[in-house]
Image (spheres, rainbow, N blue to C red):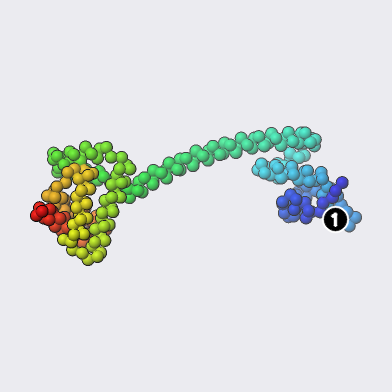
């Protein structure tokens, strides 16, 4: 019967020599052959037992449990294989249940992340923030009623798209300010005209006169003023001036 040194066994089984020494120490796998010089070697039966040990370890069984199993088994090839099959079937069921639970957890987390992403896209934008106040001040006006009719149909995606467009126009105006252009410049007036048309598209028909009233509100209502000032110092006043200039030019033409 072939004999194998511990280094050969460690290499073929892909375990460390230290592991084999430990198995020997606890009586789990004791080399069956001793040479005249006192060296211990493994035979084919030992390698079969090692294969069984590593199989059980792969199933997550403790060394103590494996010792008990090997001690109680009738050491026939058929009974050994049948026992391994039964344990493997049980392990597969456990893994399938674990996988199912993990998939459910991942699905829940994905939904949470998707919901959070939706709200992150809005970046704190609240289309109804001033709704109650607006209803009191302008609830009977045609503009308010038209805005209420339109916005009632808007989805979360619609509001996200509006915010992107709105922020883009604000950034364009900031760029003009950073270039030290005047509110009366053609560049500034072109941007506020796009702002007026955005209101016209999303909420209600916005004439130049109405846009001018909104410009006044941007500097008189500290909430609007603060919002613009947080984006760029002097933005609220610059915006109002550009709106007035754009309205005057439209009237002259």
Going by the picture, which residue comes out furthest to the front?
A: 253
Residue 89 seen from this side: yes
Going by the picture, which residue comes out furthest to the left?
A: 252
Place of residue 47 in the rendered image (x, y in percent of width and height, measured from the top left): 78, 46
Query: On the image, which quarter does residue 53 sit in?
Result: top right
Disc 1, SS: loop
Q: In this view, does 117 lie to the left or right of 13?
A: left
Place of residue 225 in the rendered image (x, y in percent of width and height, measured from the top left): 20, 56
Residue at (25, 43) in percent of width and height = 128
Residue 135 seen from this side: no
Query: On the image, which quarter does residue 232 sit in?
Result: bottom left
Check disc 1 and report the residue beneath it: 39
Place of residue 187 in the rendered image (x, y in percent of width and height, measured from the top left): 21, 59
Q: In this view, does 104 lie above or below 3?
A: above
Of 78 and 143, nearer the camera is 143
Query: On the image, which quarter does residue 50 sit in?
Result: top right
Going by the picture, which residue comes out furthest to the right?
A: 36
Place of residue 239 in the rendered image (x, y in percent of width and height, measured from the top left): 19, 57
């Amino acid at each position: 019967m072939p004999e194998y040194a511990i280094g050969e066994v460690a290499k073929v089984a892909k375990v460390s020599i230290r592991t084999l020494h430990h198995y020997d120490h606890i009586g789990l796998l004791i080399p069956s052959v001793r040479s005249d010089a006192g060296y211990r070697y493994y035979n084919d039966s030992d390698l079969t037992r090692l294969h069984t040990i590593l199989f059980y370890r792969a199933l997550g069984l403790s060394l103590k449990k494996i010792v008990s199993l090997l001690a109680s088994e009738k050491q026939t090839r058929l009974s050994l294989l049948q026992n391994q099959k039964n344990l493997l079937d049980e392990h597969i069921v456990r893994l399938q249940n674990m996988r199912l639970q993990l998939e459910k957890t991942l699905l829940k987390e994905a939904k949470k992340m998707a919901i959070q992403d939706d709200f992150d896209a809005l970046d704190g934008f609240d289309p109804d923030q001033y709704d109650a106040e607006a209803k009191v001040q302008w609830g009977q006006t045609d503009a308010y009623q038209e805005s209420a009719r339109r916005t009632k149909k808007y989805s979360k995606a619609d509001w996200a798209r509006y915010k992107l467009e709105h922020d883009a126009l604000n950034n364009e105006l900031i760029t003009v300010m950073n270039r030290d252009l005047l509110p009366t410049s053609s560049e500034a007036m072109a941007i506020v005209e796009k702002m007026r048309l955005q209101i016209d598209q999303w909420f209600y028909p916005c004439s130049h006169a109405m846009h001018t009233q909104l410009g006044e509100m941007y500097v008189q209502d500290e909430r609007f003023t603060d919002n613009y000032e947080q984006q760029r110092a002097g933005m609220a006043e610059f915006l109002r001036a550009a709106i007035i200039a754009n309205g005057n030019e439209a009237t002259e033409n």
